[in-house]
Amino acid sequence: MKRYIATRLGQGLLVVFGAITISFVLASMAGNPIDARYANISPAARAQLLHQYGYDKPLLERYVSYVGGVAHGDFGPSIGSPTGALTRVAEALPYTLILVFAAMATASLIALASATFGAIRRGSRIDAWVRNGFVALQGIPEFFAGLVLVLLFAVVLGWLPSFGATGPASYVLPVIALSLPLVATLTRLLRSQLLDVLGADFVVALRAKGLSERDIVLRHGLRNAGPPLITYLALQLGWLLGGTIIVEVVFGIPGIGSLVVSATRARDMAVVQAIVVVVAVGYVLFNLFADLAVRAVDPRVRSAT
Amino acid sequence: MNGPCEGRDVTVGTVGGGVQLVEGVDLAVEAGAMLGIVGETGAGKTVTMRALLGLLPPGVRAHGELRVNGDVVSLARVGELRRLLGSETSVVLQNPVGMLDPMVRVGDQLVEGVVRKGVLRPADARARAVSLLGQMGFRAVEHVLTLYPFQLSGGMAQRVTIAMGMMPGPRLLVVDEPTSALDANVRLEVLRLFKRLAQEEGTAVILVSHDLGLVSHFCDTIAVMYAGRVVEHGPTRELVARPAHPYTVALLDASATLTARRRVPLRVLPGAPPRPGHWPAGCVFAPRCPHAQERCVAERPLPTADGSRGWACHFPRIEQA
Amino acid sequence: MSVGDLVVEPPRAGLPVRASRLGRAWARWSALPGSLRLGLAIYACALALALVGAVALADPNAQDLNQAFAKPFSSGHPLGADALGHDVLSWIAHSVVTSLTIGVAVVALSAVVGIVVGLVAGYAGGYVDASLMRLVDLQLAVPPLLLFIAASATVGHSMVALILLISVVSWVPYARVVRTQVLVERTRASISAARLAGVSRLRLLLVHLLPPAATLILVLGSLQLGFVLLWEAGLSFVGLGIAPPTPSLGFMIAQGRASLQEAWWVVVFPGTMLALLLLAANVVGDGLQELFGIDVEVVER
Amino acid sequence: MSDAAALAVEGVSHAYAGREVLRDVGFTLEAGRTLAVVGESGAGKSTLSRLVAGLELPTSGRVRVAGVAPTVRYGAVSPVQMVFQHPTEALNRFLSVGASVAEGLRRLPRRERAAYVAALLEQVGIDPSRARERPKTFSGGQLQRIVTARALAAEPKLLLCDEPTSALDVSVQAQIVNLLLALQERNGFACLLVTHDLGVARVLADDVLVLRDGEMVELAPADDFFAGPSTPYAQELLRTTAEQMLVRERA
């Protein structure tokens, strides 16, 4: 068990290291932020700034010292901001986490209910109707959904705020916008996973024991569909939640999505780098938790390692 | 005393009547006895059994009757059949390991059906599970109950699934292609244990198999199916010794046995069994039959009874009494 | 490979013997899954709109400040105009060309790269395969949109740059799917037989290992087209993707956001167009899965 | 070379991940003869067949087919050809059956190839006009015939039959058994038959090799073996088999 976690952490470290390298390469290819920010300064002042931020050293040396810094939690200074890059990310992170977890929870609950219902009543007219509706939902981009929601509930009806993160109410619309396509994707995944399980031999045996479809789906289907689904979702988390960035921009939530866009525009690459690395770390941790969760419920995995 | 369990005039086809899968099959098996159903791919063995149990896939419908323990149920009423399933009727499917939910302990799976169904109370169900596993030859029964399916060998899984089929104390138990993946010695032991158990409990057993040899050793009676029909049935010994239907004869001839001679070709039946939807008019076996005559092609033979035996052939290979 | 070739068996028996060529084509079309037909119909309409836009509509970049915020159905602006008097319909029609060009180019490029890498990794195994899997890990750990945004400072905003950038991420799923399929296929007896028959290495890969993955690749491509359209629009929306004079849906939606209260149509019409294109990608992917009887989500796992 | 046995297995042992699955197996097989390898699952039958086919190299010992080590090389037809348990698995489902049979004939010019394929299909009882059809339009028995035709195309020194009948219907099993008998009669290849079906072994085999847990338990002429094996394990195997096999009192 301990060895297993160690191996997984080792793989995770490799991924994080890769993210550090990629973000470093991208940042150095973008040129130095001094030139991007200060167009009309004297050569002397430019040289002084370059030296101050360490941009006058060779690339490899900068890379080594960057990796060394990251290992100590130092992602370098943020250009034009008194705090370090990591601090800025840390300030933004809670907003994003609230948004992401609220959307995940909402979407999961709805998906669980609708997929289970669909699997029990599979082939029925309601099932087909719900399924087609979800296909349409899946095709709605988050920012368009967000703007339509703003138009309806903020502009026309005036019920909810459309911009900023001022209180719980200001999260309602962003969470809905982020959840809509997520609900569709999760429902489809869970439903196809359930149907996969329900096609297995042992399900015929369950029917042969005289169990009802409802019993079969609830007592056996979900239990079997769970582990592969958790694994899959954890792996695809980044892809599923990419829309968070856009939703934050649309609704003016000061999370890391808004931060990465503004930092990129300002060529504040230290912040962009920090965000890429922090996201990768989050991904690795989440996958580790998902793995442990699967081990907890699946006896086969438990005994295999 | 229980009467025989019977399937009468079992007819199965796709909804809308596109393709017939089984036509007019009659089967009967006494309490405590074992009936073997043999036939090749597409003969309709499994479909017939599923029709009796109410386990046909969607899009397929059955007619006919099931008689069990004094009840007479129309095969068209799947709800009724499903009500009986897991109490009066029960089944052991092929592929024993795949038949168990991989995420649930063996003990819970044994008990689940009868408890949910209200056949037994939890404590009684557990006691019965313990006793059945014991009768199926397990020693450390309590330990087996706590195992997960992946921890069982093929032979163990087969014994567990048989115990699972016997849990409700069914009047009729269908066993589909049992033990086909097991080694000879394991298979022999499992089937012996099972046969004794079924006899003790007075369960009528239908054993579905493509293995004529296996069936001839374990079953009291045999029904031979071909292209959705029973072409011949009768007591095992008589049927094997004096087959009446040319298909039965061919099947017996084609079997490679230990008494065959080295490098002497087997007597083969040309061609392959017809697929459902491609049954010939007249006698379904006529196109492959070495003795077919004009009448066979034109006219479908009706089942003929002769004491405990019966066949569907215009020109049976034995003298009629 | 056109979609028509993929119809498994044309329903010969059900047709009148002397059915016209057109009649037969119609029968084939009708036999396709409904979702596939819907998706293809949407694509057809979008392409028709793009064609009309190129031939008959005003230059999308033509400004007419007198016409700023012209309402829908006003003369000359069927879908209204934006703050600078750009015609919304013309902008949409030209944006469809931009979106689909990027989408198709990315899908084609990444499919070719992914197939080659997947075949090699799945067959060679060992070191090559292990490297690919680490790449897959990494690609999953950094959300694509985040990567594109981070890279946009480096690569600029041209269409070619965007195509290459998105392709850098997009080939990986193909490699993964092909690799998995090759690993499954390799254990089949047919591969042992082909080896004993002495086929060449190339023939083994292309004739014996690749075809089973073909349907998966097709489904993956159609689903991925949706992702690419979404990413492109998203990038342009935050101002880090396609920028004028090249028209794009994301850009117009972003422009319309500020004037949502006065001129809803500047957001709603291009947004609807985008949603329709994404819907088409999803239902075509769905329909192909139904047609081939496969499930990419399950297979890809 | 001409004196060498069609198949010689000499002191072969094989291990997977340190676990020995075959231990010191050795025998020879002459052209035109058939050796049946029987045993329970896990006895090492399929490992032995992979080694003989050259799909794997033994950990120790040697395998020689007509005096040469069977190695599988790209672009070189192997002297060992196989008939597999599941014919649907054994054919490329995207190629026509004719093309599959022709895979081992790439040395021939295209025109001769087609004629040869037709002749082979004819030989195994498949209508040559169906050569352009895909496997899915054939029955299991027909596919097994096609697989056999493909194996013959390469003019093998050794035909390796891995449970060739166990996935087939009884009446079709007999057809394949007879086909193998007739083909061997005509083409004179040596045949290694791996099976758990002693009935099939009774008809096809000249000699019987019994494997148990990777070791040779008995190697005997078939007639002697079926009259009464010499080792207790083989006796037990034969007895349990007999108790589930059809017994007919012959008229």
Image (tube, grey):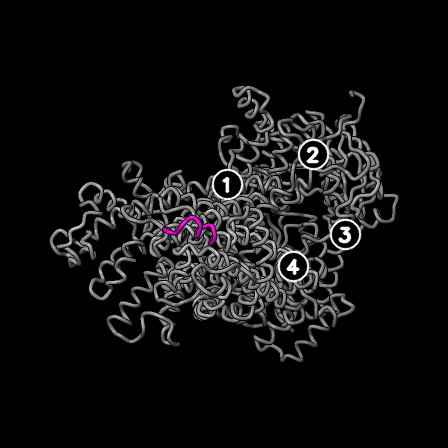
Q: Which residue is mark 4?
A: B97
> Do callouts 1 and 2 point to residues on the same chain?
no
Query: Disc 1 residue type?
Result: Ile
Label 3 SS: loop
Q: Out of A158 and C207, give the one closest to the viewer.
A: A158
Q: CA distance from mark 3 to mark 4?
A: 25 Å
Give above or below for C115 relative to D245: above
Q: Out of B96 and A287, give the one closest to the viewer.
A: A287
Q: Which residues are magenta?
A: A40-49
Task: Pinpoint the chain carrying mark 3.
Answer: D
| Mark 1 or 2, closer to the camera | 1
Query: Disc 2 residue type?
Result: Pro
Q: CA distance from mark 2 to mark 3?
A: 24 Å
Q: Out of A216 and A208, give the one closest to the viewer.
A: A216
Q: Residue at x 70, y 67 (%)?
A: B147
Q: CA distance from mark 1 to mark 4?
A: 36 Å
First in residue order: circle 2 vs circle 4: 4
Query: Disc 4 residue type?
Result: Val
